[in-house]
Amino acid sequence: MDEKEIEEVRATLRRLHRCDAHHMESLSVHETFKGRTLWLGMVEVFALTGHPQATKAFAWMRRSGVLDQGRRLWTVLARPPVDTARDAVRSAILEELRAKVQPVR
């Protein structure tokens, strides 16, 4: 992420979680399932100040749509069972899959 996107994430974390966020580092995450890449990219790690349950958050942008014109910002708080950037990506993938699967009635 560039500086503008980092600031966008900080503002989003402030708005959603009512806490301050400081960018700590960028980590490369490669998540696969049965040899297929589900996510490959950078995850930004933020230290949180003033959140009652989490001291860190993870964030990344994911391009979507034809020709990658759209994007989606993911933010995940570091709370058990999410302790690492890879855990955050996994939890987001699971959330996305659950949203796509409709229960049979």
Image: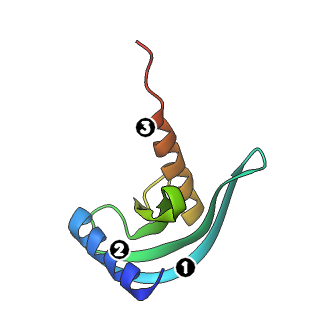
Label 2: state its secondary structure.
Answer: helix
Of the numbered discs in the image, which one, if any, rests on residue 9? Answer: 2
Q: Which one is nearer the viewer's eye here, 66 or 24?
A: 66
Of the numbered discs in the image, which one, if any, rests on residue 99? Answer: 3
**Direction from residue 29 to residue 74 in the image, left or right:** left
Label 1: state its secondary structure.
Answer: strand
Q: Position of residue 59 (x, y in %)?
A: 45, 68
Of the numbered discs in the image, which one, if any, rests on residue 11? Answer: none
Q: Amino acid at mark 3?
A: Ala
Residue topped by disc 1: 26
Q: Is residue 98 visible?
A: yes
Q: Position of residue 104 (x, y in %)?
A: 45, 16
Q: Which one is nearer the viewer's eye here, 80 or 69?
A: 69
| Residue drawn at the location 55% of the way across and 65% of the way down | 85
Residue 34: name its quadrant: top right
Q: Position of residue 24 (x, y in %)?
A: 47, 83
Q: Amino acid at mark 1?
A: Ser
| Residue drawn at the location 54% of the way across and 57% of the way down | 89
Q: Is residue 36 above or below residue 84?
A: above
Q: Residue furthest right?
A: 35
The 10 Å Cα crowd at callout 3, few under 14, some 14 to 19, many 20 or more, is few
Q: Amino acid at mark 2?
A: Val
